[in-house]
Amino acid sequence: MSPHLTKKHHTVAIVIICCLIGVFGISLFTRQGNLQSKQLMPHTQKMLANHVKVSFVTHRGRLLKTYYWSTSHSQGRDTDVTDIFNSDIIEPNSGINNHIPLDYQFDQTDLKNIKTLRNVRLGSAITLVVAKIDPADRPTGFSRLIKWLVSG
């Protein structure tokens, strides 16, 4: 090997590493900018009182992801936010729908979800069942990469 070729490899490796750092750094910035509460996770009980802890689980009960949802329209523990939460989850590309795990969608027909969405209060924890998307309907290519970068 010539020293010139090694220097090229070194330069290419540094460029690739810088690109990866840039992509993942941008994804972290877009994740926090996409959150309604501007917090990745509430740290204190006072902060948790203004959030709803949403756990996304499969039909078998396996936990996929936890998301802390909040709204600027209401504050304080035990405040009823059922209408706001339900309108947010029904609306496509809304705050909570952007945080459903990749390859999954909210299951509106599941009886557990219907019962859960009858009473949503700040400071509480709820569990939502999500269903796996059919392979033909899953995002592919560039749109899948963008969704992965934004929602994690």
Image (cartoon, helix red, strand yellow):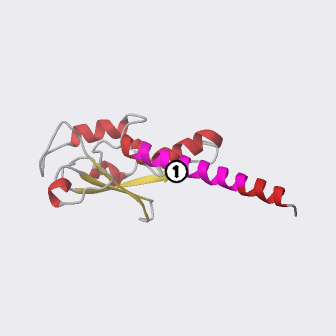
- Furthest toward the front, the residue is 3
Is disc 1 placed on a helix, strand or loop? helix
Q: Hey, which quadrant is residue 145 in on the image? A: top right
Expressed as whole percent of the image width and height from the top left, the position of residue 34 reads 38, 41
Asked if residue 137 is among those painted magenta in the image, a careful observer would answer no
- Pick the front one: 108 or 141: 141
Amino acid type at mark 1: Phe
Please determine whether, in this image, residue 127 is positioned above or below residue 144.
Answer: below
Left/right of residue 88 with respect to residue 7 in the rendered view: left
Marks counted in the figure total 1
Q: Residue at x 55, y 52 (%)?
A: 21
State the residue at coordinates (79%, 60%): 6
Is residue 107 shown to the viewer in this render?
Answer: no
With respect to residue 74, does 110 lie above or below? below
Quarter occupied by the N terminus: bottom right
Magenta-colored span: 11-31
Q: Nearer the viewer, residue 9 or 37?
A: 9
User: Main SS of the magenta segment?
Assistant: helix
At 87% from the left and 61% from the top, the residue drawn is 2
The x, y position of residue 112, in whole percent, is: 33, 55
In this view of the protein, which residue sits in the foreground, 76 or 28? 28
Q: Label 1: how many residues lie within 10 Å, few (<14), some (14-19) or many (20+)?
A: few
Tell me which residue sits at (40%, 55%) in the image. 129
Horizontally, residue 49 falls left or right of residue 138, namely left
Q: Residue 103 appears at what percent x and percent y?
A: 54, 50
**Residue 46 visible in this rendered orientation of the protein:** yes
Label 1: which residue? 24
